[in-house]
Amino acid sequence: MESKQNINSDPGATQFGNFINYYDFNTVEQRTSKIVDIPESFWNFVLDPYIVLDVGCNCGDLTEKLYEILSGEARRNVVVLGIDIDESLIKRAESKTKKNQNLIFKCIDIMNVNHLKYVNDFLESYNRKKFDAVFCLSITMWIHLNHSDEGLRNFLKTVSLKSKLLIVEPQSWESYGKAVRRMKRANYIDAFPNYKTLKWKSDIKIQINEYLQNNCNKVKVLETTATKWGRVLYFYKETQNLMLS
């Protein structure tokens, strides 16, 4: 799928959130500031290797940092699969991290059922059915704008089924309006046809939280304070595993 992006007029005008210079204005340190302080015991490092999925990995800077955090001083055996819809960003990620065989990047549209076969095959290669942790950081708005309410619900179901621990960093409803306006200014007037028909709106964070807990067999176990950008990270575990964790 071609990404609509007008670099000359506004590098921040994107249809899928695939900013070419994202970490220049929202650094990796800022984005992981609430993750580094989480105690190691929370992650439940039981199986070896510890397998992670980073959805919407961009050029891999954050993915690499997540690997470093989870590996820790003990240098745990952690494998991270980063996926993104933008092939050029995936190539950049591969070129920067090619010496680390535990960082794998793949151009995948998680909303494409056919693309999910690679994710399933990846898990099967480790004899697993789920990732130990799935990160969905600042990705829900782009799924929502491009695939409507139903698409967002399907996305939440998909990542819930694939995760033991699910980390979601949803954007606010105000961010939706900003994204739409930037695309209009870049002359992509019809970029988000679903925007005006969305029913999950001003209380989007509450609706995502309720849907995950009421429909996806997840329960919220941690909510961080806001990052510098005002984003909150929500951590969910499977309900049947709570007594074991």
Image: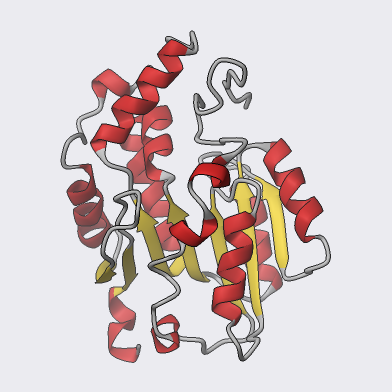
Q: Position of residue 140 (x, y in %)?
A: 38, 44
Instruction: State the residue at coordinates (30%, 59%).
Output: 216
Compared across the picture, whether 183 is left or right of 242 comes to: right
Instruction: State the residue at coordinates (54%, 70%).
Output: 129
Compared across the picture, whether 239 is left or right of 188 comes to: left
Instruction: State the residue at coordinates (60%, 60%).
Output: 63
Above or below — where is 212 with respect to 9?
Answer: below
Compared across the picture, whether 80 is left or right of 93 comes to: left
Of 119 and 107, nearer the camera is 107
Above or below — where is 184 with respect to 210?
Answer: above
Of 109 and 189, nearer the camera is 189
Quadrant holding the N terminus: top right
- Residue 199 is at least partly visible in this image: yes
Instruction: Count the marks.
Output: 0
Of 32 and 132, nearer the camera is 32
Compared across the picture, whether 148 is left or right of 61 comes to: left
Colour mapping:
secondary structure
- Quadrant of residue 224 in the image? bottom left
- Quadrant of residue 30 in the image? bottom left
Q: Position of residue 189 (x, y in %)?
A: 43, 9
- Quadrant of residue 147 in the image? top left
- Residue 191 is at least partly visible in this image: no
Of 198 and 188, nearer the camera is 188
Quadrant holding the C terminus: bottom left
Q: Position of residue 76 (x, y in %)?
A: 63, 86
Q: Position of residue 36 (x, y in %)?
A: 45, 74
Instruction: State the residue at coordinates (32%, 34%).
Output: 175
